Image (spheres, helix red, strand yellow):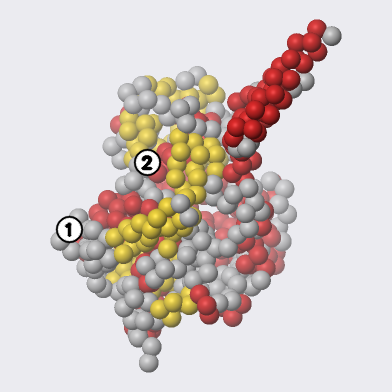
Amino acid sequence: MKKRTIYIPLLMALIAGAGLLRAQMQMQPQHKLAMAESAISQLYVDTLNEEKLVESAIKGMLEDLDPHSSYSNPQETKELNEPLEGNFSGIGITFNMNKDTLYVISTVAGGPSERVGVLAGDRIISVNDTSIAGVKMKNSDIMKRLRGPKGTNVDVKVLRRAAGQTDTVDFRITRADIPIYSVDAAYMVDPETGYIRINKFAADTHKEMAAALKDLKKKGMKSLILDLVDNGGGYLNAAVDILGEFLEPGKLAVYTEGNKSPRFDFKTDPQGSKPLFGDGRLVVMVNQYSASASEITSGAIQDWDRGVIVGRRTYGKGLVQRPIPFPDGSMIRLTVAHYYTPTGRDIQKPYVKGDQKAYAMDILDRYNHGELMHQDSIKYIDSLKVNTLRLNRPIYGGGGISPDKFVPLDTTEFTKYYRDVQAKGCINQFAINFVDENRKAILAKYKTDDDFLARFKVTPDMLDQLYAMAEKEGVAKNEEEAERSRPLFEMIVKGLIGRDVYDQATYFKVFNEHDPIFKEAYRLIKSSDYNQLLSAPQ
């Protein structure tokens, strides 16, 4: 009874307050929300976590909007921003998890780990006396232990295999600023054709890209293949800066516009007197997972007839999010405008507000409808047709960037057996074990990664070892599917071994020999078909 007599006056006050608010302010939505939170926090029968309650309310509001407005708590905000900021403080390694053990793929040149003697192939089994081996720890939890403020120390115990023996070594590593690279690979495919792969558009991407362009030009590059496959985007300014190295100064790269956001034009303004690669053949590789800044880049190149887009229709993420930070470190990313290419094409694919599930299923729907495999399954809408700005070529809007040259998704080598072997982590585990046992021999026999690329072969015996490893993990061998997927197994195994022995670029050198989008990009850049695609309608 006591509790009841305490709460009744409060409830009556709230009701009275509601009446007053209705009279004075006609019950504005924000006041209704505040009253609801106040009533729940003060009257609800069970104990409440008010912070979580408010977060749930924010998420609920955003879920009824577009698919890309979102809320992140302080830790999530930090993790979202870090990959794009260009650096963090840590020990300077690239690692992989193999059988619940942290395996060092490589050390950052000149970084803290390299300076104290950590080697590729080492296994870190404990951090500050806490075991991280065999405990099924998440990658994010491991990174929290390895990363920390610049200048602080971290003690690691390493398991090292050398000369057929296993030993443990203790290291004390002083954390330092570690760069996060967004250019995965930059190399010459032939004496005149360069290749650059970008994995995201981050704070330092333009600087990395410019350095790669200069280096390849010194090596004789006259044509360039720019790989944006699977690139989910990043910073708008990074895309605009990169476009400045392909387009003339002052060219419209993209513009934004929304109901409450007036149009704003972003134009190219290269730092040098002219673009680093303002002429010469340019082919851009994209697929259904190329999004956001990737679409800004490929869309502007297509609109200005600067190059040829090859692959499959891009993702269609053309909504501009404005970060709204809160004092506790959490953040709302609120959609405020749309991205439009220079011809006025809306990059964003259609969506229904509040229907997150249908939006998430879009790529699968494209697959089921045949769009990823058959060009004639792609539906172009005449009302969304525009013409390019220099050659007046017809191109289409409607969400994403449609390529000038379609390359179908090739699933002939992908089997259920391959999927299951890969899902168990067996391919990666086999490559790690093989490099452990053969690193010195590989380096002695193949002095460079180009030598490795030309002469190293994945043997039937190696594949048999892989299949046996998968068998132990519960994946029964399917002879027919194993044979059908054999080229895929050989390519991935060779690429992973090359990556672990040499560097990340080696993996893409191996992969590109097999990749249909790259092969078509290279064919186009070397043939007269390039000029035919970039020609004015007759």
Residue situated in front as seen by the camera: 267 or 10 = 10
Residue shown at 64% from the left, 73% from the top? 370
Placement of the N terminus among the 4 image quadrants: top right
| Disc number placed over residue 222 in the picture, else none | none
Residue shown at 46% from the left, 73% from the top? 403
Farthest residue, direction front: 23
Placement of the C terminus among the 4 image quadrants: bottom left
Q: Quadrant of residue 9?
A: top right
Residue 521 screen position, x and y as percent: 41, 73
Residue shown at 51% from the left, 28% from the top? 125
Mark 1 residue type: Gly
Mark closer to the chain start, 2 or 1: 2
Q: For the residue carrying disc 2, how many other residues have a C-alpha within 10 Å: few (<14), some (14-19), or many (20+)?
A: some
Residue situated in front as seen by the camera: 281 or 105 = 281
Q: Which residue is mark 1?
A: 272
Q: Which residue is mark 2?
A: 85
